[in-house]
Image (cartoon, rainbow, N blue to C red):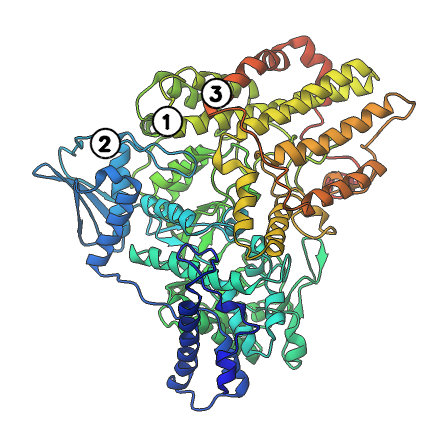
Amino acid sequence: MSLNSLYDTSSDRSLTPTSSSMAPTAGGNFLAGYLTKVAAKVVTVGLLLSAGVSTITHAQAEAAAKAIGQAYQDVDASAKGQMAAAQAVIDRVAPAMKGKYQVEIIPAAGDLDVFELDNNNGVLVIRGNKGLSITAGFNRYLQDYCNSDVSWLGSNVNIPATLKLPPEKVRQVTAAKHRAMYNYCTFSYTMPWWNWDRWQQELDLQALKGINMPLSITGIETAWYNVLLKYDFTDAEARAFISGPSHLAWQWMQNIEGLGGPISKPWLETHVELGQKIITFQRSLGMEPIMQGFSGHVPKALKQKRPDANIHDKPEWGGRKSFTSELDPLDPLFVEMGTDFMQEMTRLFGEGKYYGADPFHEGAPPVKGSAYMNATGVAIYKLIESVVPNAIWAKQSWGLKTDLLEDVPAEKFVLLDLRGNYQTDKPWEVVTGVLHSFGGRTSLHGSIEKLEGKHERVIKGEAGSAGMGFFNEGSQHNPVYYNYYFDMMWKTEPVPVSKWLEKSITARYGKENAATLDAWKIFIDTIYSSTSVGLERDSLAAARPALDVRKTTPQCMIQVLYDPYLFAQGWKKLLEPVDTFKGVDAYQIDVADMCRQVLSNLMIELHIQVREAYDARDIDAFNKASAQFLQCIKDMDAVSDTMPDHRLEDWITDARSWGTNQAESDKFEENARMLLTRWGPLEMERAWDYAWREWQGLLGTYYHGRWEKLHNYLAETLKTDEVYYDTNIEISQGRQALRATSFLADLTEWEVNWITRTNTEDYKYDGRFDNGAEASAAMLAKYWPVIEKVYTDPSYRSKTEKYRKVFGQKFDNDPKNRKNRKK
């Protein structure tokens, strides 16, 4: 190994120093950062030699010298360390609590976590068997004694000058041994652009809700980069394998490679540090995060570098052929490369207890038959065990092939049941889950009644259920729905929603109020009723424009599964005590979000009026209906602007902040725009608008712009004999194909231009309203007469029913229409 390979920095941007905030910086600290990183590289090579590797090749030495990331430093997980970590969370969430409480560590309740709230001579005492239990106990204290709530969208923390104390000791044992959180997709649909400050807010929420088994995969792209260098990949080849930041989730699920890439070295360096910081926080409280294992996903280019290895191309994914390659788990290279990957994960992130591995995800194994699947399962668990002997394989139930697990010891495996409905007589432990918010879509929905059933299943231990999990693809919406499931994780008896609701809403808004409770009873009977189960229904505003529009995404339909007028009445009721809750963030968020959903539902009726006028060839009526339709999208944009987590401006600003120069910032912005619109390559038509969301900026520019183009085109045809028709044309995934008409072909070019139009700030909004209540009140005054007419006027309903009934129906000529195929 030459000294030049250690000290030559001419092409190694990984030596760029970073600030503690994890965003790249420049300046006077460069030399110190440079020397630190050089020393780390020397240590890395030394570790190879001291670990019993008596000889290493020049290529191995070079790979070790170029490896990014310092070795992980173990966290203080002692009782004292965990108490300090818990206090840090409490003091950050509620600074007014400083110096007003004590924390103590107590024994666990068998293998279950427990917390206690107590009064020790006028001092609040919060006890728990670990730091995480203490923070969960504090969350209970906030709810029950302070009428406070901390949630994923809108919070209310109000600590009285004199603390209320429990009159007697409160002891609560968790109902769930495992309390898991996140789907891989969450890291792309919600988290790709977060810095440490934003991550700390999320981690504090994990701590308050008592999550002990979070998926933790930030920064693992650096482990992949370092391993590939060892397998003769050049720097450029290794980085080309890794997708852009907003698509990394599907890389780790073995669906893609290199999409939106290549990744940059500054990204690799900053994000391994960010990942280490996240996992250190989690372990400091006693969490056991799920780390990334190895299940055979490898670069397609590995076939050229290891031609004798048994590497299969995945036939297709998402409508695109041969996106990725998989190394056969029975090939000797699987053990070699898998061991290298697992060891590198350990070097960077320490040893974990749980490792995720999902072979053949959304695909078929290359060899049919149970014998192959049995052997594959054994190979994966043996690999994990060989590197981390006490580790447990944590696998998602998505596309589960039970043959895979026949010969895996039950104690070495836990099933993450994403949908919470898996039935098995196997002796595995099962985490009963909720799969919510596909694509991060913003529809208010989810059956709380179904959550009750999942909780009871855990209490009874049905089908091996030993835990509860929230496997959301996106977050930052439906906060009350989230709160119910997280609260139930700490209840050992069933709690009816009706009993839970009053206390929860009082805590969310800070005081009891009859109007807010009445409003929420309506919401439980509409957006959160038993009819609002499964996938969220599509948004017409976010749909690709068509006269006969029926879907936004491939899976769902544009329809409302509850009484939209009753829901609107709930929104109106929620606005009644607006003066009472002017300063309450959670209330401001909720009235805005309910308003957005009311207007979103109304868009169906406004579209019906547009279509009716067009079919009648009534130019004046069409222009009037079109103006109201387009203005409603703009109004939704203004309402969403009052919700900080629902702004395209923030999404793009955060994405651009990670760039080290304008070109990289532009690339990250395009990455961010692409995910929310066309998702991936043009030929992946089925993925277009998968991740729709009714956000400020998207509504005001992209969605409004598309619909305005269609309406302008239709208005021109009304001046001639031309009639635009888009029903019996080429249909793809239940929608008009991308270029099925000349208008749609032109629209495709406009959409691509919007996605690639970076650094323009065209998405910014000037802020028509100061807060959600002000926006909501303005929309109520403007739209309530329209709402009453379209939902309650019998003559209007009768006249427009023929248009309304198509929503929720498939096209007769849709290739995916099973009924049509039978014919």
Left or right, 151 with reference to 802? left
Mark 2 vs mark 1: in front? 1
Where is residue 11 drawn, in percent x and y? 57, 72
Question: Which callout, 3 or 2, points at the residue further toward the start of the chain?
Answer: 2
What residue sits 35% from the left and 26% below the top?
A: 509
Q: Is residue 107 above or below residue 368?
A: above
Question: Which callout, 1 or 3, points at the residue further toward the start of the chain?
Answer: 1
Find disc 2 in the rendering and name its residue: 145
Judging from the image, what secondary structure is the residue with disc 3 in? helix
Find disc 1 in the rendering and name its residue: 584
Question: Which callout, 2 or 1, points at the residue further toward the start of the chain?
Answer: 2
| Residue type indicated by callout 2 | Tyr
Quarter of the image for the C terminus: give it: top right
What residue sits 65% from the left and 42% below the top?
A: 689
Find disc 3 in the rendering and name its residue: 774
Label 1, label 3: how far apart the Cα atoms are? 13 Å
